[in-house]
Amino acid sequence: MTSAPIAHYPPARAAIFDMDGLLVDSEPFWRSVEVDVFAALGVDITPLISRGLTMGMRVDEVVSFFRSRLPWEGADDDEVIARIVHGIVAAIWEEAELLPGAVAAVDFFVERGCATALASGSTPPVIDAVLERFGLAERFPVVCSAIDDRLGKPHPAIFLRTAEALGVDPLECVVLEDSLNGCVAAKAARMRAIAVPSPAYLEDPRFAIADLRLASLEQITALEVADLLGLEQVAESAAR
């Protein structure tokens, strides 16, 4: 667990969770499905995805990103997006698993009086598949997809819209993210960011932008986390 000095924030009143790669181990599916879909188009995207450049981005932005660098003939962007989404939804139902500590991390915030929301760059069909497969819908009264915003992460639009839906000031929100793009978006929204990168990116110095870096969501219950975010204060005020 590593942390960096943060600005003085009021106690957290809401926790906003990313989904892919944070709650559910779906990032490998995105990579494998995208590789297969583009390979069928005669395009090798492996040199680009190996650098994590598209992690946290919306699927339409990912497709545009690859087209700008590796143009192909035939299927248009909408058809490619549909193929990817279909493959991801199938993989969610057949193979996906929650990452360690996922449910406990959500409950950690709920038990301390924080509202919870899901803010994902995935499309609604993928989000719905995850929520239904793992019975998470009741834990997230507010669910937002970046597909509804003009720009996806690292733009802060989705987090600002989620805070508005929660009725909570951005300064009172904590964002949990596995991707660098998501952490950049959270900080641009003036929110606290807890990064939970995959093991391959855990030591990536770019994650210094986050206020706290964890190796796993299982570490969210550490007393240092509650102290850092002022969550005990929230629990006390909620009880009065």
Image (cartoon, grey):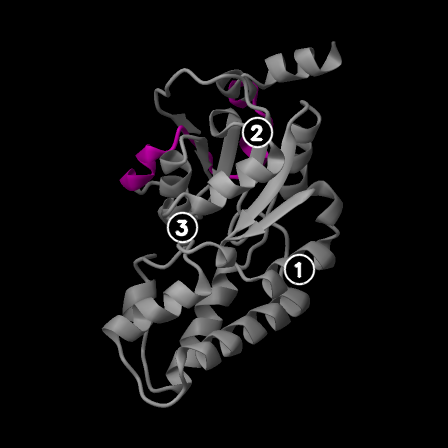
Membership of 220 in magenta stretch? yes
- The residue that label 3 is drawn on is 153
Circle 1: residue type: Asp
- Mark 1 surroundings: few (<14), some (14-19) or many (≥20) residues within 10 A: some
Membership of 72 in magenta stretch? no
Q: Nearer the viewer, residue 215 or 187?
A: 187
- The residue that label 2 is drawn on is 168
In this picture, is 235 found above or below 218?
above
Which label was assigned to residue 128? 1
Q: Is residue 70 left or right of residue 38?
A: left
Instruction: Indicate which disc, 2 or 3, sits on the residue closer to the N terminus.
Output: 3
Element assignment for label 1: helix
Region in magenta: 205-225
Circle 3: residue type: Lys
Element assignment for label 2: loop
Q: Quadrant of residue 115?
A: top right
The single residue placed furthest to the bottom in the displayed view is 74
Q: Nearer the viewer, mark 2 or mark 3?
A: 2
Q: Nearer the viewer, residue 78 or 176?
A: 78
Q: Is residue 121 left or right of residue 156?
A: right
Q: Is residue 142 left or right of residue 202?
A: right
Estimate the x, y position of residue 206 in percent, counting from the top left. Answer: 29, 40
Instruction: Indicate which disc, 1 or 2, sits on the residue closer to the N terminus.
Output: 1
Instruction: State if disc 2 and disc 1 touch (CB < 8 Å).
Output: no
Circle 2: residue type: Val
